[in-house]
Amino acid sequence: MIKKGIVFCALVLFLFSCSSSKNGLNKPVYEILTVNNDGGANIKFYEILTEPKEIMMLLGDETLKKKIKSSDTTNSSFVILNAGPTLESYNRIKIEKVIETATQIEIFIKDSQKNTPIDLSDDNTLYPYTILKINSKKPIIIK
C-alpha cells in the first residue's frame, strides 16, 4: 500500500514537472488603449510617441491615466491615429495587424474614414481617434 502511494506521488510530481506553463511576463505586441468617436484633432495625422516627456502628456486624460503605468514611459511607445473631421458616426481607422520583426514594429492600418471640410459651427462634425500602446521601444513603421 505504501509503495503504491509513493509511486502515485512520484507520478503526480513527474506530470506536474512536465506540464507546460505560460509565463505571465509575455505581453502582446500592442494594446488598444482607447477608440473614441469624437474628441480628436481637426486634422488627420498619425503620431508616434517614444520619449517619456511625450508619453507623460497622455496621463492628462482621465481614461488613459488608469491604463498607463509609470514604467510604460521607458518600456513602451504609443501611437495616436487621429482620423480628422468627419460626419460619420464612428471611427473607421482599423488596425489590421501589428507585426514585430527583429528590428522594428510594423503597424498595418486600414483608413476608410471620409474626411469632411472643417466647419467648427457644425455640431455634427466628429473627430475620431485611436490610441495604441506598443510594448516595445523598437522603431515603428505605419503602413
Image (cartoon, helix red, strand yellow):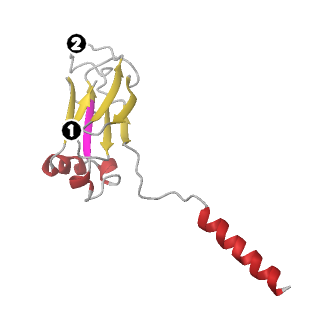
> Element at badge 2?
loop
Position of the N terminus by quadrant: bottom right
Q: Left or right: where does residue 99 sit relative to residue 104? A: right
> Element at badge 1?
loop
From the image, tell me which residue sits under label 2: 117
**Of residues 43 and 87, the one drawn nearer to the viewer in this rendering:** 43
From the image, tell me which residue sits under label 1: 139
Residue at point 26% right, 20% down?
Answer: 85
Q: Main secondary structure of the magenta part?
A: strand
Q: Left or right: where does residue 18 sit relative to residue 12? A: left
Residue at point 34% right, 54% down?
Answer: 66
Q: CA distance from mark 1 to mark 2?
A: 33 Å
Q: Position of residue 118 (x, y in %)?
A: 20, 17
Q: Position of residue 81 (x, y in %)?
A: 27, 30
| Quadrant of the image occupied by residue 32 | top left
Q: Is residue 68 visible?
A: yes
Residue numbers of the magenta segment: 77-81
Above or below, 19 relative to 45: below
Position of the C terminus by quadrant: top left
Q: Residues within 10 Å of mark 2 (few under 14, many from 20)?
A: few
| Quadrant of the image occupied by residue 100 | top left
Q: Position of residue 2 (x, y in %)?
A: 81, 87
Q: Is residue 40 visible?
A: no
Above or below, 24 relative to 115: below
Q: Amino acid at mark 1?
A: Pro
